[in-house]
Image (spheres, rainbow, N blue to C red):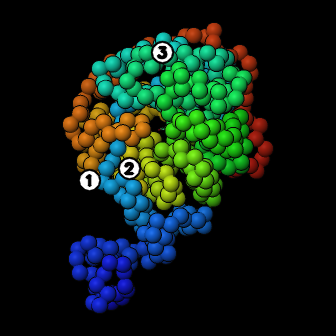
Amino acid sequence: MIEFKVVKGFDTAMNTPQTSGQMSEFIWAKAVGNAGLSDIHEKVLAGERLSFEEGMRLYATPQLNVVGYLANIVRERKNGNVAYWVRNQHVNYTNVCNKGCLFCSFYARPKDDPRAYTMTPEQAADKVRNYGDVPITEVHVVGGVNPKLPYSYYLELLRAIKAARPQAHIKAFTMVEIDQIVRAAKKPAAEVYEDLKAAGLDALPGGGAEVMSDRVHEDLFYAKPNAARWLELARAAHQAGLKTNATLLYGHVEQTPEKVEHFVKLRELQDETNGFLTLIPLSWHPEKTALEHIAPPTGVEDLREIAVARLMLDNFPHIKSFWIMNSAPVTQCALWYGADDVDGTIMEYEIIRDPSRDRKQVLTSRQLVEMIIEAGREPVERDPLYNVVSVGLENVSTTEGGLVEQFANKGHNIENLDILAREEVTTASQRLKHKVKGTLLEQAV
Ligand code: V47
């Protein structure tokens, strides 16, 4: 026997749904009630901010579809039926890094690592010229922290890429790289941002904060700037008029309260600066990392991270499902769980590698648009600042695929050893050996 309750928008005299839209609302209200989330539903409908405790409940409930339903309310309120994509290219200019993060497989030690590469600015510009036939609007530039690179390198890198691709926005350097660049520059972050802007920097990606928890910072990435420093540098970027993104790396050793706290810290800064565009939950890939014994996140976890991010970050305009990390199929579903952006064509990607594709990490513009249409959303090509470039199928092609086939694995491992660092660093595997019994890591092993 169904018990009818008054639900917003119903004919209260009859107390029964009158239209199919009301019926669907009614059914969802029942599901939300069964999940014990009616109070959160009310707040979502009223556009009220959710608390830390409410964030914890969104993670705790087994009814993922209900969390997705709530997130979709916010998603459609902010972005309607639109799903954004971007015609972009990633350039990972160096894999040399002295940070030794245990979750990472990308980095090469500064000393004697045969995998190490560092592109000269001209070599990075060549990477961009390889895709000259594609009307890219964004070049996404990130790398490891190579301690031997002088300040001038970063400015020359931006100038060379800008010269090769004057129409494209350059989105470059996580806050971890910015911390290093500020050190190399020996001047305040505000001045460094002005220099970077003059050299061609248009915006900054997320990345580097991982999860804002002192505990995880100490265990997995102690050599990187901590949450306070990451936030300080993001604030300075926003004050310099630069838009930035933020990420959350999940699925390793983090715990739920740490993820909720991460969202709370980000939205507090956003209240202050309004400089963030997008939050990207990054699904952790354990393969070839020091923690590869830990199982990767499942599709269910991926969808929940997207949904909770959408619900907690009420002041972020966009939530991105980064298809490289989440997979294209999960990203299609994520468009109904809070995400309004799937990122882009990518071309080549080093930070994680699908062994079957190696560096060839591409979806053509046609594939991206078809993937969005199949998911039931409206594809809109954007630039990095979410200005509309094209809609629907009007500007799609398949040329990206052929170019990536031609260029991705060529001229890449560039011997440029004179700019590699020579000092000793603690690597991920060395650190693991020194971990004392009883720590989280040891338990995980
Ligand atoms: O900070 C490193 C992550 C980040 C792994 O702003 C890993 O639009 C998963 O920030 N498994 C860099 N993730 C990438 C990044 C990013 C990506 C896409 C779009 C945007 C954007 C930003 O990659 C690092 C780290 O959190 N990462 N290793 C791994 N094994």
Amino acid under label 1?
Gly
Disc 3 is placed on an element classified as helix
Residue holding disc 1:
376
Q: Is residue 87 left or right of residue 266?
A: left
Q: Amino acid at mark 3?
A: Ala
Q: Nearer the viewer, mark 3 or mark 2?
A: 3
**At numbered mark 1, what does the secondary structure look like: helix, strand or loop?**
loop
In the picture shown, does residue 417 fall above or below 85? above
Residue at screen point 71% across, 34% down:
223
Q: Tell me what residue is drawn at x 43 percent, y 28 percent.
A: 169
Q: Which tag is nearer the camera, tag 1 or tag 3?
A: 3
* Residue bearing mark 2: 340
Residue 218 appears in view = yes
Q: Are marks 1 and 3 in contact (CB under 8 Å)?
A: no
The image shows residue 84, relative to residue 360, as above or below, that is below
- On whether ligand 1 comes within 8 Å of the CB at mark 1, the answer is no
Q: Earlier in the sequence, mark 3 or mark 2?
A: 3
- Image coordinates of residue 366 in percent, x first then y, are 25, 36
* Label 1 packing within 10 angstroms: few (<14), some (14-19), many (20+): some
Q: Residue at 27% of width from left, 90% of height from top? A: 14
Q: Quadrant of residue 178?
A: top right
Q: Is mark 3 within 8 Å of ligand 1?
A: no
Q: Sequence order check: which comes first, mark 2 or mark 1? A: 2
Q: Position of residue 11 (x, y in %)?
A: 28, 84
Q: Which disc, if any, is residue 160?
A: 3
Picture coordinates of residue 262 (x, y %)? 61, 52
